């Protein structure tokens, strides 16, 4: 069997091995079926693809460069480290790639009302952005606790014309906002498109979001050989690719075209928070168990009664109690490796990259940078590590400054 056919996933029902699928109520069956049909129809449609590529070029500013981080590599001492600069995209992260694809699909399906849930607000801002761009009505569900913690993003969404609906049920965070968004979808299914922000949710979302984000990896397959040749390196592919994993969309996006090249190590970095064994983390692959969340089976953080657990990470974007089903499968078959990076190591990498390269990374991406630096030190100089720098760190200044104060106080 050739490798690409082993990895041609999912099956017709949206399963990646035993993960994925569509676990939904009867009331959503028609809406989900309609979406599956629309996506099947448009994913290979030349006009759809051409418009998507034009939007990525003119609105997002793609392709984003691959950059050789020479000084960071010298700091690490070992393999060379390269950065895929998703931080340079319009709105400052990879999320915009996916929301453009889904909003284009919504327009073609005649659905002019977009709903979404958001935790930290970054997906909400991306959705509000694209709704302004296409003149779509935008409703974003957000836990009232998160609304307080992430007020600048609430202001951004409102500035962009979105309605932010506070959710006061449960713990008033992401998982409650998710339930509320699904409830809205059930009651307004005729004219509403539900825009999911990662490779999670019921089929076809994990596949669709991966396909939209795969532009990241596809660009790398063209950019990396040119850059390696310029540096006098005689290889076509990086030896390892490192990306942070929240729901897993930036990681799936850069992994996808490389899955069929088994010599390329694929490494996903989960938020280890205060430590993988502290109970305060968001490491769904390394510490989760199989279960159904958000309409698909994957690895999730849950207690013995199947109650979804609270998660912790210094980076709000990694603070999700599940992970996309394709990652659970890549983990199970051993094609990708998953590791954890703690809050404090991510913070160190945040400062290091800022100081030696003049690039302030998002705290999410800092987890990937931290692992790349420690991995590089163990590898010879002729090896290459490609890091997906999923976003920029402007949004994290308050969080980082707060940790500096507490550290300063501790030292004083
Ligand atoms: C949202 C976000 C993530 C996590 O989401 P994935 O779906 O795992 O990619 C990572 N980095 C940044 C900058 C984000 O905004």
Image (cartoon, rainbow, N blue to C red):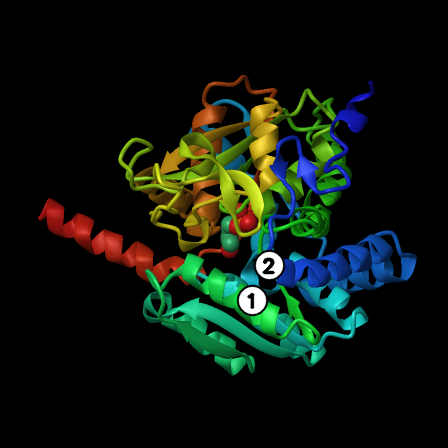
Q: Residue at x 53, y 34 (%)?
A: 268
Residue 68 lies, in percent from the top left, at 60, 38
Cα–Cα span, label 2 and label 1: 6 Å
Question: In the visual, does 187 lie left or right of 409?
Answer: right
Q: Residue at x 61, y 64 (%)?
A: 90
> Mark 1 highlights which residue?
116
The reply to whether callout 2 and callout 1 are in contact (CB within 8 Å) is: yes
Q: Is residue 253 visible?
A: yes
Counting every numbered tag in the picture gives 2
Query: Which of the 4 image quadrants contains residue 101?
Result: bottom right
Question: In the visual, does 75 lie left or right of 214?
Answer: left
Looking at the image, which is closer to me, 202 or 30?
30
- Label 2, secondary structure: give it: loop
Residue 392 lies, in percent from the top left, at 50, 55
- Label 1, secondary structure: give it: strand
> Mark 2 highlights which residue?
196
**Is the CB–ligand 1 distance for label 2 below 8 Å?**
no
């Amino acid at each position: 069997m050739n490798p690409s056919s082993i990895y041609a996933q999912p099956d017709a029902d949206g399963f990646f091995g035993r993960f994925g699928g569509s676990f939904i109520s009867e009331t959503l069956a028609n809406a989900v079926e309609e979406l599956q049909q629309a996506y099947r129809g448009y994913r290979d449609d030349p006009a759809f693809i051409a418009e998507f590529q034009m939007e990525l070029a003119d609105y997002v500013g793609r392709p984003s460069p691959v950059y050789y981080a020479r000084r960071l590599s010298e700091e690490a001492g070992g393999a060379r480290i390269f950065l895929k600069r998703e931080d340079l995209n319009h709105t400052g992260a990879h999320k915009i790639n996916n929301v453009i694809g889904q909003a284009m699909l919504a327009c073609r399906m005649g659905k002019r009302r977009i709903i979404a849930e958001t935790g930290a607000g970054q997906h909400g801002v991306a959705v509000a952005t694209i709704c302004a761009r296409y003149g779509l009505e935008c409703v974003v569900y957000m836990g009232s606790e998160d609304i307080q913690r992430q007020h600048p993003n609430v202001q951004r969404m409102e500035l962009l014309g979105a309605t932010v609906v506070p959710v006061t049920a449960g713990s008033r965070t992401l998982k409650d906002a998710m339930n509320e968004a699904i409830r809205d979808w059930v009651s307004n299914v005729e004219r509403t498109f539900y825009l999911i922000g990662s490779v999670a949710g019921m089929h076809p979302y994990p596949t669709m979001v991966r396909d939209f984000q795969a532009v990241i990896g596809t660009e790398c397959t063209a950019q990396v050989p040119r850059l390696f040749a310029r540096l006098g390196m005689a290889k076509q592919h990086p030896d390892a690719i490192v990306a942070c994993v929240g729901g897993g969309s930036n990681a799936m996006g850069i992994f996808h075209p490389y899955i069929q090249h088994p010599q390329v190590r694929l490494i996903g970095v989960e938020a280890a928070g205060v430590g993988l064994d502290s109970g305060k983390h968001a490491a769904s692959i390394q510490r989760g168990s199989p279960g159904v969340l958000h309409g698909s089976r994957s690895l999730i953080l849950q207690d013995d009664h199947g109650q979804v657990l609270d998660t912790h990470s210094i980076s709000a974007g990694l603070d999700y109690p599940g992970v996309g089903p394709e990652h659970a499968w890549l983990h199970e078959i051993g094609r990708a490796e998953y590791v954890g990076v703690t809050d404090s190591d991510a913070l160190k990498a945040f400062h290091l990259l800022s100081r030696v390269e003049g690039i302030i990374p998002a705290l999410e991406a800092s987890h990937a940078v931290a692992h790349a630096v420690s991995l590089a030190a163990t590898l010879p100089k002729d090896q290459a590590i490609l890091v997906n720098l999923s976003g920029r760190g402007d949004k994290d200044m308050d969080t980082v400054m707060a940790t500096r104060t507490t550290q300063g106080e501790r030292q004083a």
